[in-house]
Amino acid sequence: MLSKEAEKFLTEFRLEMMAHGKKDEAIDDMEAELEDHLIQAEKDGKSLEDVTGRSAKEYIKNISGEMPRINNIQKYIALFIVYLAGILTVPNLISGDFDWTLSNLLYYLGIIVLGPVLIYYGFKYILVNYASFKSEKIEVKGTVLIFVFSFLYMGLLVGSIFLVRSYPIVTFFEPGRDINITIGFILLAILVIGSLLMKQWFYAILALVLAAPEMIAQVFASGGPNSESYIIISSVGLLAAVIILFIGIRVMNRAKK
């Protein structure tokens, strides 16, 4: 039975290998071999440092260079960033309420660049300290931290929107509502068709699901995006879309199991 410290190291090892784009088969083989070494070392009364050296991170870095990478991992990361930018901007464009200001563009740039970094390191800390890949379980503390992190992250996003709208800094141009909506539908079509061409059905559906509440509100609400009826319809639609998406993911996971 491995110590808690050794289990944390194995979890961190797997996460780092995945982040570096290593093949799953290579990760599994190396992790199994490393686990055997750690078990034997603990039986012999040796510490984790005796196996990995003084620095666990340095050990992971050295091993990482020796393992094969998944081809074109940088390309997929770049495509994901483009996709992320699309699904964040399309709903606002379709609502006709997108602000072409410096602060707004910096806001989306921050989400695209810093958002994944925050999410990665936040969830990495939780998974390393409060989860196990083998049992596929997360401790109660880890679940609570995920909830708190998600709540704070969403609060940061929502709070930043108010700052962005209050302090535009520089307004580049103010296109009409119809132009924003047209740009939004063009980008949505590009996202969906691009995802389907890459056989990424989930991402195509996700783009449609996130844009659907705004499209429904455009049809059934009276007044612009700031009207009470529009806000109610789009908010209820978004909540329903998230619930449907969550149920769909759960059903798919159970089907795979």
Image (cartoon, rainbow, N blue to C red):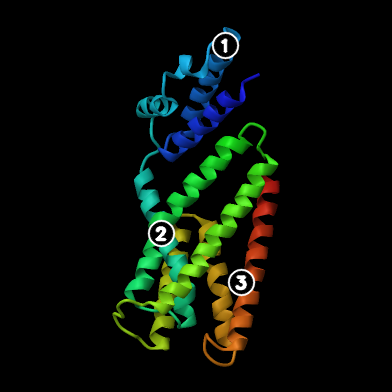
Q: Residue at x 38, y 34 (%)?
A: 69
Q: CA distance from mark 3 to mark 1?
A: 53 Å
Question: Which label sits on residue 40?
Answer: 1
Q: Nearer the viewer, residue 227 or 82?
A: 227
Q: Position of residue 175 (x, y in %)?
A: 35, 86
Crowd around label 1: few <14 · some 14–19 · many ≥20 (10 Å): some
Label 3: how many Cα within 10 Å (few below 14, some 14–19, many 20+): some
Tag 2: residue type? Ile
Left or right: residue 217 versus residue 171 is right
10 Å neighbourhood of mark 2: few (<14), some, or many (≥20)? Answer: some
Name the residue rendered at 38%, 88% in the picture.
176
For the question of whether residue 119 can be seen, the reply is yes
Most foreground residue, 47 or 231 = 47
Residue 54: quarter of image: top left
Q: Which mark is residue 238?
A: 3
Quarter of the figure that contains the N terminus: top right
